[in-house]
Image (tube, coloured by chain):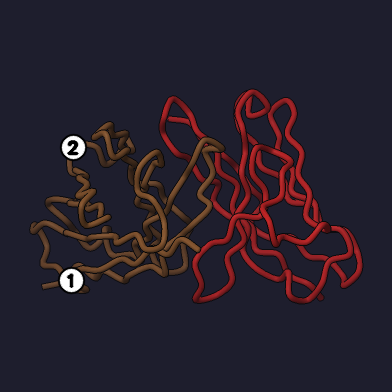
Chain colours: A brown, B red
Amino acid sequence: QVQLQESGPGLVKPSETLSLTCTVSDGSISSYYWSWIRQPAGKGLEWIGRMLTSGNTNYNPSLKSRVSMSVDTSKKQFSLKLSSVTAADTAVYYCARSDYTASFDYWGQGTLVTVSS
Amino acid sequence: SYELTQPLSVSVSPGQTASITCSGDKLGEKYGSWYQQKPGQSPVLVIYQDTKRPSGIPERFSGSNSGNTATLTISGTQAMDEADYYCQAWDSSTGVFGGGTKLTVL
């Protein structure tokens, strides 16, 4: 059973960079897309972006100028960086896997990131 | 940018059929997925590729997608099905979610 676990600071200051890591357990990291999805409290889901282990990435156009993703296959981890954060970036951040079906079949438990000084 | 529109809320009596719609331009030409999210939990995939159920998802969950509308149908709705439901599709390699529908079973 594939397991995903997000990790990173729970508090980030405005204008700084949010950095999160997702660790994949009990499964291959290759041949899948790995996405970041966020959800502000009481609101809906927003897709941030995805990447393959080959390095191919797709980002949400609304966040593209501030987002970067990377992967460390040896550690079975992929990472998210979101720069110049504001209070509007406060949300629960999820990592998720998608395969050839293009659906998100495995999700992490989510991690709350608060942007505040 | 591409948008998916869902009703904010749907109510259903136990044992009855609930239908949740998701509308988007030419959505029927794309594959749609549906996710169930209960309070404090991560979303769970309940329908993928418009009509398919992942292993472990009850048969009462079904989906369809045609024209501009995808529909999630829950037959014989149970109290445990009360949750938020999100549709999702891809538009030019960009993931898009609907705004979510709160399903109330009462």
Q: What residue type is labelled 2?
A: Ser
Q: How many marks?
A: 2
The correct choice, above or below, for B37 with respect to B32 in the image is: below
Residue A65: which disc? Answer: 2
- Say which label, 1 or 2, has the lower sequence index: 1
At horizontal 29% and vertical 62% (from top left) the residue drawn is A23
Q: What residue type is labelled 1?
A: Pro
Q: Quadrant of the C terminus of chain A?
A: bottom left
Left/right placement of residue B34 relative to residue A5 reads right
Left/right placement of residue A70 relative to residue A111 reads left
Front residue of B93 and A42: B93
User: What chain is tagged by disc 1?
Assistant: A
Quadrant hosting residue A109:
bottom left
Left/right placement of residue B41 relative to residue B94 reads right
Q: Name the residue under label 1.
A: A9
Point out the frontmost of discs 1 and 2: 1
In the image, residue B65 lies at what x, y percent?
A: 73, 34
SS under mark 2: helix
Quadrant hosting residue B15:
bottom right
Front residue of B25 and B48: B48
Front residue of B104 and A77: A77
Check if mark 1's residue and mark 2's residue have beta carbons within 8 Å: no
Other-residue count near label 2 (Cα within 10 Å), few / some / many at <14 / 14–19 / ≥20: few
In the image, residue B50 lies at what x, y percent?
A: 69, 38
At horizontal 73% and vertical 51% (from top left) the residue drawn is B20
Tell me how far mark 1 sits from mark 2, CA to CA: 22 Å
Quadrant hosting residue A115:
bottom left
At horizontal 39% and vertical 41% (from top left) the residue drawn is A33
In the image, residue A57 lies at what x, y percent?
A: 28, 34
User: What chain is tagged by disc 2?
Assistant: A
In the image, residue B11 lies at what x, y percent?
A: 78, 65
